[in-house]
Amino acid sequence: MAAIADQGRDIDAKKLYSKISWRLIPYVFILYILAYLDRVNVGFAAVEFKRDLHLSDTVFGLGGGLYFVGQLLFDLPSNLLLQKVGPRVWIARIMISWGIIASCMMFVQGEHSFYAMRLLLGISEAGFFPGMILYLTYWFPSGERARAVAKFMTATSIAGVIGAPLSSFLLKLDGTAGLHGWQWLFLMEGVPTFLMGISVLFVLKDHPDDAGWLTDPEKKWLDAELERDRKEGGATENHRLLDAFKLPMVWVLAIVFFLDQVGVYTVNIWMPLLLSSFTHLGGANAASVIARYATMPYLAAAIFTVIVGWSSDRTGERRWHIAGCFLLSVLGFGWAAYAHSLVTVLCALTLAAMGYWSLMGPFWALPTRVLGGQAAAGGVAIITMIGSLGGFVGPTLTGTLKDKTHTFSAGLLVVGGMAAVGAGLCWWLKPAGGGTNAEPQPNEGR
């Protein structure tokens, strides 16, 4: 990459973005692992949690999905407040409050308290994910963004890799101090979130200009590069909140994200129970087997997410990367619906997870290129709000169909069919050269 002169010294863009990545991504990666673990650990606790509280599949699926109703209601105001008060203070507030609520999941006593706590968890965490996506736009231009988002998004996969054995260990504490294993799980996975929320106040920097680890020439060059990128993508024209509502691309992307989240949270919430249905085991034995096998889909998804993000930035192509990932998920869920062994269903869910998770890099490079200011905060929130409906629909629909048909097949086929619709919608995401809705050209912004 050509070095760019700035105030008498050369700024090597590649080295600068690498420096920023190493400073930011590992830390926000850890934050997102905690966020994701707290929202999906109910899936790992499912076997004992349902048994001890006498919950049906319908109730469990609805409770798992209510988290996303809370997010739907508060993502937009939360993201607008983040832009107003700054990421450092607002992200810290989010993490501290959701850490407290996540730990209080240990006090659930039945159907209604389960519903209430999942709803409160969604409300308390609202704005975290869209806020972090918005935060990355303060540091990376669009040509670098798919890789940055992909690295950040691998936290969702790694949370599964870490969460399975960790949850298995905590569930084995059943009976210790008079608590159920799932109570230990919620308590011990909620407290670190609270503590990391406090650390955000001291570690996170709002903007490049606040970063003491960047030189003044690096700050000025990066500010100029980000401004140039915003102008080329149309973000300087689409900067009012109303612009986010008026831009058709935002709504197409919102539907695409909805369809992705239907599949993501069907995997997260129901995969442990689906795997356990092939083990013919119960209690701690089932949890141990699930923990051993459930890491495979998440680990494969993490690796594939980075590969897809790198490929999308290298070529500058977005929509067909997204469509291809959806089709991989269609194949995975279709295969899982007819699986008759643990190994087969595990391989099928691995394909599905690879597809659903890996499209996030190229996906989030699209809206953050054409929106700026309040429009960027609002647009990202609109997309995640509608996506939250997918997180509600997927688990709820799967649980309802499971109770009605006594098999997972119907739910898996319906969710896989929705992924096929997502692949088709990518046709409406315009390729390069299509105006403000266009994808960035290869190597743009570097």
Image (cartoon, rainbow, N blue to C red):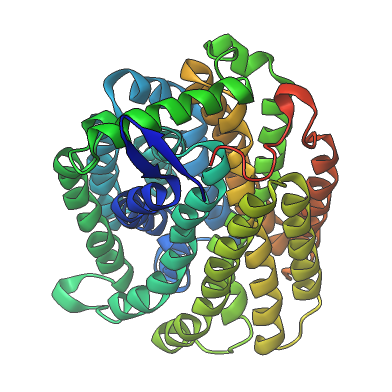
Q: Quadrant of residue 257?
A: top right
The residue shown at (58%, 47%) is 391
Q: Position of residue 298 (x, y in %)?
A: 53, 70
The residue at 71%/46% (across/down) is 318
Residue 199 seen in the figure? yes
Which residue shows up at 26% across the image and 48% down it?
99
Give me the residue at 48% from left, 87% from top. 289
Q: Is residue 34 left or right of residue 272?
A: left
Residue nearer the viewer, 177 or 354? 354
Q: Could you say where residue 215 lies in the image, as x and y percent from the top left? A: 23, 38
Side of 33 where 349 appears, left or right: right
**Horizontal and vertical percent position of residue 344:** 72, 85
How many numbered tags mark residues here? 0
Residue 48 visible:
no
In terms of image quadrants, where is residue 370?
top right
Front-lying residue, 303 or 68 = 303
Give the vertical position of 49 relative to 145 (above or below): below
Q: In the image shown, does 307 or 378 lie closer to the viewer?
A: 307
Residue 398 position in % (x across, y down): 68, 58
